[in-house]
């Protein structure tokens, strides 16, 4: 019974509260719902189109042709995105599809491009190992058909740009390697010429010629000793003939053949024969050197100087013989001609020996000069070997670099052919996107339900707040609870006809004001929310 009494009292309080605050609740509910419903109905519709681009791996095995582009697909996708989302590319898309027509007259091109970048979303898709296998391109806008066309255009741009990027980088790598290879080849040829010139200039001072130089040096020293002995013999013969004032004895250097007696005038002819034999020998040695060395080689120069010296001696001796009187008869080789003076005969006999002695002394000087040159060669061999080793070290390094660049160029050319035939890693669009049938935002039914809940909540909150702020007493029980004086009787409100008319006017005026306020509020909301994508982003955060 007590519970029923309490329930009746609570219901009476609620009814009293509703009677007092119903117009406040109506106004609050109408204001909030009108605003939210108007905004929900006039918010612009945003359509989204999402297209998936698959990353197809290289069709030729990597062990056959190495991929030309190092780095991960993520880095390449980022580089391509930078190009696709550049100012120039997006401006072309805006002009091509007539995007943002209302904003193009109000905003500069940089702002429009930045707006379009916000409307584009590129999201990579990886496998379980974290490797990039695909990516999605999403574009949003107010027209479903245009949005789909822009999304397809963006996907095609990614595919084309990836192909161009790979071809461009493969071609750039090949061009760079060709240029580097040309420079290294020129450097290599220059080093080859330097080594060749060095060997040609110092060919006789290198270690391969060391044994030959030592052997030649020993041979020259032996010739020098033999020359000294010949000079001693010739000088001895001259001194003996001068001391004895006799005809010169038989030349010990050039012994006569058995059974043949040498004539007093024969030393000149013997000397001439000897010089001609020596000349033939030098010419033969020169013929052996010419196929091996150039005219600037020291051995060739030495042989030519020796040949010229011998030719001069032979010419001088031949002139002397031609100017000499007729020799004595062979039947009496040592008997002087009756008309010849012995002193003249002695001079004529000594002249060939002096000529031979002069030739031996000239040969001695040439041998000493040749020994000095060969000694310099032997002494310079370690230094020349070190210089050649330094040149060869640089040459070997350049040659290794050339071979490495040549190998890499061949790989780059294979990679370039691979990209031109589109057998490398490619971006591929399997299915083109079609226009969306429903907008991605706003979700109007959901927003209307939220508006209804918000309106009811605001109305209830304002009623409770007004009731809390109201300090007046509305019932006898409240009066009894608020005072210590006894309440004897309650007098109901007496409404006169004038009060009723005043109340009707007040209600009419309040209703007109409320309606005007709601109309004004709805119009303001319509003006603010119509085409307001920023408000749409706020009300639909998960869609953008």
Image (cartoon, helix red, strand yellow):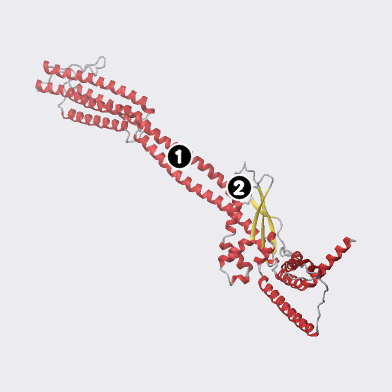
**Is 57 or 332 nearer to us in this picture?**
57
Q: Is residue 125 above or below residue 153?
A: above
110 to the left or right of 447:
left
Q: Is residue 321 visible?
A: yes
Q: Mark 1 packing: few (<14 Cα in 10 Å), some, or many (20+)?
A: some
Label 1 secondary element: helix
Residue found 10% across the figure and 20% down from its top:
342
**On screen, residue 310 above or below 171:** above
Query: In the shown orientation, is residue 92 left or right of residue 373?
Result: right
Residue 503 image offset from top left, x and y in percent: 77, 81
- Taking the image as shown, residue 218 lies to the left or right of residue 133, namely left
Q: CA distance from mark 2 to mark 1?
A: 33 Å
Q: Position of residue 235 (x, y in %)?
A: 17, 19
- Which residue is found at the position 71% from the left and 57% from the top? 431
Q: Secondary structure at mark 2?
A: loop
Front-most of 510 and 338? 510
Q: Give the quadrant of residue 337.
A: top left
User: Residue 131, relative to residue 118: is it above or below?
Assistant: above
Q: Residues within 10 Å of mark 2 (few under 14, many from 20)?
A: few
Residue position for label 1 = 398
| Residue that numbered label 2 is attached to | 72
Quarter of the rendering containing residue 200:
top left
Q: Earlier in the sequence, mark 2 or mark 1?
A: 2
The spot of residue 429 in percent (x, y) is 68, 56
Residue 473 screen position, x and y as percent: 76, 70
**Of marks 2 and 1, the one in the foreground:** 2
């Amino acid at each position: 019974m007590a519970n029923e009494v309490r329930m009746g009292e609570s219901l009476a309080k609620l009814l009293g509260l509703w009677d007092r605050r119903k117009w406040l609740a109506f106004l609050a509910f109408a204001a909030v719902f009108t605003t939210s419903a108007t905004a929900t109905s006039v918010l612009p519709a945003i359509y989204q189109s999402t297209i998936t681009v698959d990353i197809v791996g290289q069709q030729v095995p990597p062990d056959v042709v190495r991929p030309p582009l190092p780095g991960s697909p993520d880095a390449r996708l980022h580089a391509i995105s930078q190009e696709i989302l550049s100012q120039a590319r997006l401006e072309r898309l805006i002009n091509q599809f007539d995007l943002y027509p209302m904003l193009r007259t109000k905003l500069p091109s940089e702002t429009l491009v930045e707006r379009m970048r916000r409307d584009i979303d590129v999201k990579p898709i990886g496998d379980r190992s974290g490797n990039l296998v695909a990516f999605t391109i999403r574009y949003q806008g107010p027209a479903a058909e245009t949005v789909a066309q822009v999304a397809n255009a963006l996907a095609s741009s990614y595919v084309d740009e990836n192909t161009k990027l790979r071809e461009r980088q493969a071609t750039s790598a090949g061009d760079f390697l060709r240029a580097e290879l040309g420079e290294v080849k020129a450097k290599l040829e220059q080093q080859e010429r330097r080594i060749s010139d060095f060997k040609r200039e110092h060919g006789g001072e290198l270690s391969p010629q060391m044994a030959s130089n030592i052997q030649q040096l020993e041979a020259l020293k032996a010739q020098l000793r033999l020359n000294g002995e010949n000079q001693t013999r010739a000088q001895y013969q001259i001194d003996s003939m001068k001391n004895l004032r006799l005809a010169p004895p038989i030349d010990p250097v050039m012994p006569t053949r058995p059974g043949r007696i040498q004539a007093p005038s024969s030393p000149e002819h013997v000397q001439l024969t000897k010089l001609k034999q020596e000349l033939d020998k030098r010419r033969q040695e020169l013929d052996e050197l010419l196929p091996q060395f150039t005219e600037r080689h020291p051995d060739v120069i030495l042989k030519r100087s020796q040949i010229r010296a011998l030719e001069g001696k032979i010419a001088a001796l031949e002139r002397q013989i031609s100017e000499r009187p007729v020799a004595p008869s062979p039947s009496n080789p040592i008997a002087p001609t009756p008309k010849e003076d012995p002193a003249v005969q002695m001079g004529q006999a000594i002249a060939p020996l002096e000529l031979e002695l002069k030739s031996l002394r000239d040969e001695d000087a040439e041998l000493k000069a040749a020994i000095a040159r060969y000694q310099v060669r032997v002494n310079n061999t370690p230094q020349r070997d070190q210089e050649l080793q330094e040149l060869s070290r640089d040459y070997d390094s350049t040659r290794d670099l050339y071979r490495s660049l040549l190998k890499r160029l061949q790989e780059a050319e294979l990679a370039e052919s691979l990209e031109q035939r589109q057998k490398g890693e490619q971006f591929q669009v399997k299915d083109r996107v079609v226009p969306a049938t429903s907008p991605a935002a706003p979700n109007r039914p959901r927003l209307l339900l939220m508006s209804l809940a918000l309106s009811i909540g605001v109305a209830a909150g304002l009623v409770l707040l007004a009731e809390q702020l109201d300090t007046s007493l509305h019932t006898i029980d409240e009066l009894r609870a608020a005072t210590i004086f006894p309440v004897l009787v309650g007098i109901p409100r007496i409404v006169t006809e004038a009060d009723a008319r005043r109340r009707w006017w007040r209600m009419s005026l309040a209703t007109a004001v409320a309606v005007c306020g709601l109309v004004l509020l709805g119009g303001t909301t319509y003006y603010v929310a119509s085409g307001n994508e920023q408000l749409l982003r706020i009300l639909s955060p998960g869609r953008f």
